[in-house]
């Protein structure tokens, strides 16, 4: 039980980081930020690595549209890239480049993005055994509009999610909607629709009814059905 652990116990630290990440995923950036900053102080005092915490903080500041502060923390992550695996370098670099761009530093962002793409192209989706990292690399390629490669990584993320999660887990639905978005860029609209419908069913069964993913996915389905109908009319 997390409440029975000492404040600096590694298990409690991990629990707090997972909580902060879930809060940030749900758009509760200020709440997540408070947790991250508290854990960062404890981790620095203990002399442990902090770059993943700085990453979480940078994501929160991006969500809060405080771009200069996001850059500071993303840059701190990037400084530690020699300690990272290839997929970490690619993803953390993409976040850094994104923060730089939003902060009006486009030239610096473009240079980081060039380095990121070099790292990403070295990666094989079959050698990455975590769905979250596969999805992150898919995002890197999607940013560069390499939809085919993005789809390859995202498909593998879906495969791993099906293998490792219980059926109907919301995280699987998240992966499905991300793949659908990539497929729509390739005009694979019928396959995308099927994925969105599967995701919507999971969301309705597993999430609170006010979760924005439910309405968001339903709206995408309506939009995609309309597009497919229009395609059919045009083809006729």
Image (tube, helix red, strand yellow):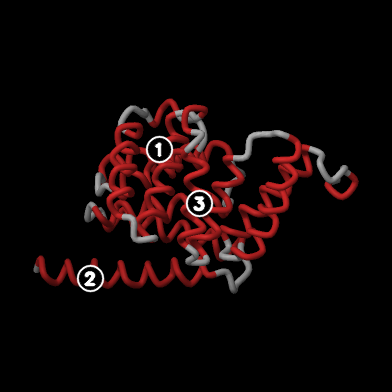
Tell us which disc is closer to us: 3 or 2: 3
Cα separation between marks 2 and 1: 39 Å
Quarter containing the N terminus = top right
The residue labelled by disc 3 is: 72
Q: Which mark is residue 129?
A: none
Residue 83, image x and y in percent? 52, 27
Q: Earlier in the sequence, mark 3 or mark 2?
A: 3
Q: Is residue 175 left or right of residue 122?
A: right
Quadrant housing residue 104: bottom left
Image marks 2 and 1: residues in contact by CB distance under 8 Å: no
Crowdedness of circle 1 by 10 Å Cα count: few (<14), some, many (20+)? many
Spot the residue most to the right. 4
Quadrant housing residue 120: top left
Name which residue lies at 58% across and 62% down.
Answer: 26
Image marks 3 and 2: residues in contact by CB distance under 8 Å: no
Residue 235, image x and y in percent? 10, 66
């Amino acid at each position: 039980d997390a409440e029975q652990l000492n404040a600096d116990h590694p298990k409690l630290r991990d629990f707090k980081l997972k909580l902060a990440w879930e809060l940030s995923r749900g758009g509760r950036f200020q709440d997540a930020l408070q947790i991250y900053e508290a854990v960062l102080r404890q981790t620095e005092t203990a002399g442990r690595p902090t770059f993943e915490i700085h990453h979480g903080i940078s994501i929160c500041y991006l969500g809060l549209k405080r771009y200069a502060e996001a850059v500071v923390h993303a840059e701190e992550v990037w400084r530690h890239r020699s300690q990272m695996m290839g997929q970490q370098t690619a993803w953390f670099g993409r976040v850094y480049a994104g923060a730089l761009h939003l902060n009006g530093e486009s030239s610096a962002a473009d240079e980081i993005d060039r380095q990121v793409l070099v790292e990403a192209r070295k990666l094989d989706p079959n050698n990455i055994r975590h769905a979250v990292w596969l999805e992150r690399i898919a995002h890197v390629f999607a940013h560069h509009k390499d939809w085919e490669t993005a789809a390859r990584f995202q498909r593998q993320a879906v495969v791993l999610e099906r293998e490792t999660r219980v059926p109907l887990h919301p995280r699987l639905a998240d992966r499905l909607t991300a793949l659908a978005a990539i497929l729509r860029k390739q005009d694979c609209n019928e396959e995308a629709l099927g994925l969105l419908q599967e995701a919507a069913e999971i969301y309705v069964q597993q999430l609170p009814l006010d979760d924005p993913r439910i309405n968001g996915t339903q709206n995408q389905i309506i939009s995609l059905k309309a597009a497919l109908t229009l395609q059919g009319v045009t083809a006729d």
